[in-house]
Image: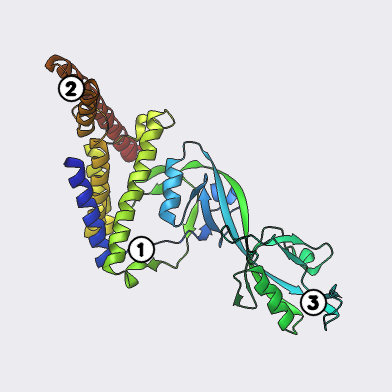
Amino acid sequence: AGPAFNYLFAIVAFIGIFYSYGKIVYPSVVGAVVEGEAADLAGIKPGDTIVSINGNKTPDFQAIGNEITLSTSDEVSVDVERPLTFKLFTSEIENPCSVCENKKEKILGLMSLPAPADEKTGELLPSPAVVGNVMSGSSAEQAGFLSGDMLDSVNGVKLNDFTQLKDYVSAHVDDEFEIKVRRPLHLTAVLRETKFDSGDGKLEKRRMLGIQSTAGIVFSHRNMTFANAVKSGFGEAWDVTVTTLRAVGQMITGQRGGQDVGGIIRIAEMSGDVSKSGGLIGFIYFMALLSVNLGLINILPIPVLDGGHVVIYLCEMVIRRELKPRVKDYIFKFGLFIILAIMVLATWNDMVHLFNRWFD
């Protein structure tokens, strides 16, 4: 029942926050790049959209921060989409159609990807708005178009597929067209620890990418109904669960050290920091995050925890008899030893963290 109530509290708290105050989303669009930091050295530029890090999608800046924190290597793979604007001039070629009225055809020099087929009917679908190839010697090649560029608009008109571009060019007598694209780039950034102000005048060290978000913040609560708040509340609980399990899995497999384990002192410190920066709402959100983590810890298969009891019950179901009290006693003592060892490690880490924060 413990883990269930932990999750129930967290979900209710998330729903209440999202319905009453909304969810502030920082789009994963780079507003500024800190000179000399990892992003700058990797070639990331303002205006780039961070699509994924190490293959994991990053729809917002919170996801970017999570991936940087969870990375077990200082070297991270970053996929971005870079907005570019081109001005192209058309050229005319002979129309291969012998029965068509127009003997000349205007082209930009861009070729589409092969048209995909519908999985059920087999019919050809419109080609995606992605450049498949660039004609040699064309104005598109001279402008710098590359295969893989994703077409966004032509002269301000949104493009959903490649056919729309061809139709627009054919229907307009203009010889010059402004085309906006998004160029996918695969970059590698090498993270390093950077000192930053934690908000109370003390400097902390943390691995950072070295980017800042754009000024445009999306306040989801403006259009968030209760149903959307419920959906977002469950989604937030799920995201926190996945992130926590990834971190725990990295510790178990040795990819992440035990220095990230924190205890009561760290929780109290973080609660104070969150209350100062985020007020009551920030504190409630932090309590919801903490509740999810406590729920997960409680279902770990460690004796004396709820998860350990479940494992024992399953073992008894398999062997079809109850374990001897003496055996259970040894198992629970072993589980208690593990819990005490984790508490000692967490307290030690908390003291080291406080020492570094105060005197570094």
Residue under pointer 2: 332
Q: Residue placed at 81% from the left, 67% from the top?
A: 138
As measured in the structure, the alpha-carbon distance from the residue carrying label 3 to the one carrying label 1 is 47 Å
Q: Nearer the viewer, residue 212 or 358?
A: 212
User: Which numbered disc covers residue 287?
Assistant: none
What residue type is disc 2 on? Phe
- Name the element at disc 3: strand
As measured in the structure, the alpha-carbon distance from the residue carrying label 2 to the one carrying label 1 is 44 Å
Q: Nearer the viewer, residue 147 or 264?
A: 147
- Name the element at disc 1: strand
Instruction: Mark 3 or mark 2: name the one nearer the start of the chain.
Output: 3
What residue type is disc 3 on? Lys
Q: Nearer the viewer, residue 154 or 269?
A: 154
Residue under pointer 3: 106
The C terminus: image quadrant: top left
Task: Give yes or no for contact between labels 3 and 2 (Cβ–Cβ under 8 Å).
Answer: no
Residue under pointer 1: 24
Res. 227 in view: yes
As measured in the structure, the alpha-carbon distance from the residue carrying label 3 to the one carrying label 2 is 80 Å
Q: Residue placed at 69% from the left, 77% from the top?
A: 167
- Name the element at disc 2: helix
The spot of residue 120 in percent (x, y) is 56, 59
What residue type is disc 1 on? Ile
